[in-house]
Image: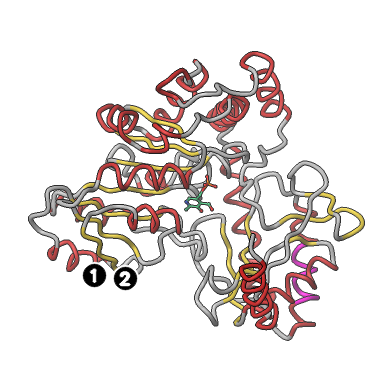
Amino acid sequence: MSAALDQSLQGDLSAMQKAGTLKTFRHITGPMDTQVTMAEKSGPVLVLSSNNYLGLADHPEVVAAGKNALDEYGAGTASVRFICGTFSIHEEIERALARLSHTEAALTYVSCWAANTGLIPAIAGDQDALVSDELNHASLIDGCRGSKAKRLVYKHADMADLEIKLEQVKGARRIFIVTDGVFSMEGDLAPLPDIVALARKHKASVILDDSHGTGVMGKNGRGTAEHFGVEGQIGIITGTLGKALGGAAGGYVAGSGALVEYLSQVSRPQLFSNALPATIAASAGKAIEILEREPQRVGRLHEITRNLRDGLKKLGFKPLEGDSAIVPIIVGDTAFAIKMSQMLLQEGIFITGFGYPVVPEGTARLRIQACATLTDEQIAFALRTFEKVGKQAGVI
Ligand SMILES: Cc1ncc(COP(=O)(O)O)c(C=O)c1O
């Protein structure tokens, strides 16, 4: 790299440092669980900042499934999928994902980022239109930006604005409403029944990214569609295997047989990038099996989220309202959020402060995420610690 480029990049990094927005990367020295060990802090640390919603990331069966697949299939296919890169285990997990999503078929990608950015440009071209929620995840935004379709953004979860935008794209060959199921920074839900009704009225298809809803929402963890009773009514669902479903990596698109067949023919990450490693397909497949076998994990996750939220409110915090397992507390500016997360780590709680540019300036937050395997003692410890740090920081 040229010295001039390095100098220029150093300048940008120094500016972030000065603004207090430079992110610090923490190091976990063992498996992800409710309690971990970290390089930065001696002794056990309670994690309230992971997407390991069902506590399956280090579940013995999930780990064993990955190890067995490594023995059975080796490291990978050393090829993109259409050349010689599909293992039988890919078909198995895709059947399981379709079952979970209430769709005919599903197709895996190496991440949900790849799924969203591989899906949207493939099905929305220059005669089409994308109408997208303003708070959608960056991968949906980049997926839309990568498409030649007309792109309109509606105000967050605002159905009147969505309808105005749908009127503006009347006549397009294909119209897509693009939304997260659970919005990752707010923890609130897309109003799916209204979105489904508007999609019907305007002959649009819904693309739902349920990365934070799968395994979390609904009585059985089948996602935001189950929560709202609209399963089978969402045309296209995308999601990740990197959160509730084992926590390693991987993503998918679930939809009709025609959609999946079409994507396997033309979606660029399918054509030009290797398939999901067998270890991950097997671990995530096992995670789905556990979810279907033990729906009580989802019930416990809901109970824990309620207890955390109610406990925080009793202490004087004002978490954002929502039905998901994400409980954000807005604290103001980015540097302050980072400082609070450092104070919490000193007390034995790992929770990341999110600030600009992940969320708008002035709305930096601590995002608490529940996990189904948190114990009542751990929740009590978390609340005691939040009280101590909240008072020290002058937040309560
Ligand atoms: C809503 C949403 N979509 C997509 C992604 C990307 O998932 P992956 O890590 O599988 O690329 C995330 C991860 O943060 C997410 O929250």
The image shows residue 145 at horizontal and vertical percentages of 34, 58
Left or right of 144, for residue 345: right
Q: Earlier in the sequence, mark 2 or mark 1?
A: 2
- Please say whether residue 384 is one of the residues in the magenta stretch: yes
Look at label 1 and name its amino acid.
Asp
Quadrant of the rendering where the N terminus is positioned = bottom right
In the figure, residue 367 lies in which quadrant? bottom right
In the image, what residue occupies the spot 12% across and 48% down?
173
Left or right of 203, for residue 36: right
Specify the segment rendered in magenta.
Answer: 382-389
| Residue assigned mark 2 | 155
Which one is in front, 375 or 348?
Answer: 348
In the image, what residue occupies the spot 34% across and 65% down?
157
- Please say whether residue 171 is one of the residues in the magenta stretch: no
Look at label 2 and name its amino acid.
Lys
Left or right of 83, for residue 45: right
Residue placed furthest toward the right: 42
Which one is in front, 311 or 98?
Answer: 98
Near mark 2 (Cα within 10 A), the count class, few <14, some 14-19 or many ≥20, is some
Left or right of 346, for residue 12: left
Residue placed furthest toward the bottom: 394
Magenta stretch: dominant secondary structure: helix
The image shows residue 391 at horizontal and vertical percentages of 77, 82
Q: Are marks 2 and 1 in contact (CB under 8 Å)?
A: yes
Q: Secondary structure at mark 1?
A: helix
The image shows residue 130 at horizontal and vertical percentages of 25, 56
In the figure, residue 381 lies in which quadrant? bottom right
In the image, what residue occupies the spot 50% across and 68% down?
321
